[in-house]
Amino acid sequence: MRQPQLERQGGLPSSVTIYEVGPRDGLQNEPATLPTEVKVEFIERLVAAGLPVIEVTSFVHPKWVPQLADASEVLDRIDPAGQVRMPVLVPNDRGLDRALEAGVRSIAIFGSATESFARKNLNRSVDEQFAMFEPTVRRARDHGLDVRAYVSMCFGDPWEGDVPVEQVVSIGKRLYDLGASELSIGDTIGVATPGHVRALLAGFADAGLGVEHLAVHFHDTYGQALSNAYAALEAGVRTFDASAGGLGGCPYSPGATGNLATEDLVWMLHGLGIETGVDLASVVRTSRWLADLMGRPSTSRVVRALSAGTSS
Ligand code: HMG
Ligand code: MG
């Protein structure tokens, strides 16, 4: 399969981490619920493709996200404590109980930078979300788990419009300070642009949270995700969330479409000579396999180009 021509550029790192969210963010918004065995095979294929971190499912309320109601069954059939880190979303103590029972070693809490989305997604106000997360993070850390924190609606909100940088920084830092090892900055509705990304990263740096503590999580609704990832890369970010085939979206955020596609990100990074440990051809084959099962083509430009027959 075709690979990008290598042209290195000064000032960029020799390697970065891709945090794969396909099995979680990718599948939580699908109209159809995939069978457990398909989810397990999806995860196994991503492991075989070299993804170093794979967010495998969610222990949220099954009525809120029925697509991932089989989280325990999925975990029964994979090795969440193996070589590849396999975090799961956990909103509260009940979710943590279920995750611990399943042998999970790494969780992610997910807060909102806006009141509207906190209420829609968590049935809580912004302040109440901290009250919900605080004991959960403490207990997870007591059990030796790694905790990631997400902050959503960092670049715009469907109900509130623009979201001030200071508001995102203040809420994001509070989430990180609960005891997270990393804060993932979410562009939930895919409206960010590169200058906005730089401004937000600078805001976090001013508040004492440098790029070494941050990951970026771009949805591609407005076609900006890859440009935004490049801006973050230049600014020093080293962890990038992405979803195989560009699957994704949030059921509680109207208009939010897929994540930055793993293949599109890998194409750019490998072209720049930046190692990811990911085998591009294997991820493309995985996304094609899943797209065939779902009965529609992948939204990833790289998957489509490499599947067209003319460029491979
Ligand atoms: P609630 O209804 O307020 O829950 O939901 P509650 O605390 O009032 O509890 C009500 C009942 O639910 C209780 O049972 C609990 O035990 C049960 P009862 O006593 O009535 O029999 N319950 C649970 N059961 C199983 N698992 C649980 C759980 N929690 C409570 N974890 C809650 C509050 C947070 C649970 C709910 O709002 C929820 O599940 N929200 C999740 C929504 C979601 O998953 N959204 C998508 C992920 S976020 C995202 O995609 C954004 C991201 O990608 C970044 C970005 O793009 O920006 C991360
Ligand atoms: Mg997301």
Image (cartoon, helix red, strand yellow):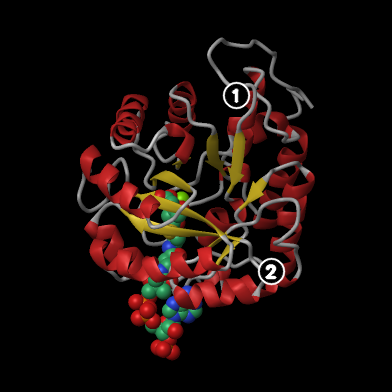
Observer-nearest residue: 59 or 67? 59
What residue sits 28% from the left and 42% below the top?
A: 169
Position of the N terminus by quadrant: top right
The answer to whether one can see residue 305 in this image is yes
Q: Left of 156 or right of it: where is 56?
A: right
Dividing the image into four quarters, tell me where ligand 1 lies: bottom left
What residue sits 20% from the left and 50% below the top?
A: 160
Element carrying mark 1: helix
Q: Which amino acid does label 1 sit on?
A: Met
Position of the C terminus by quadrant: top right
Q: Measured along the vertical axis of the image, is residue 263 above or below residue 98?
A: above
Q: Which amino acid does label 2 sit on?
A: Val
Q: Distance between the residues labelled 1 and 2?
A: 32 Å
The image position of residue 12, as x and y in percent, is 55, 18
The image position of residue 40, as x and y in percent, is 73, 62
Observer-nearest residue: 39 or 123? 123
- Other residues around mark 2 within 10 Å, as few (<14) / some (14–19) / many (≥20): many
Q: Residue 268 carries which label?
A: 1
- Other residues around mark 1 within 10 Å, as few (<14) / some (14–19) / many (≥20): some
Observer-nearest residue: 66 or 178? 178
Q: Mark 2 points at which residue?
A: 74
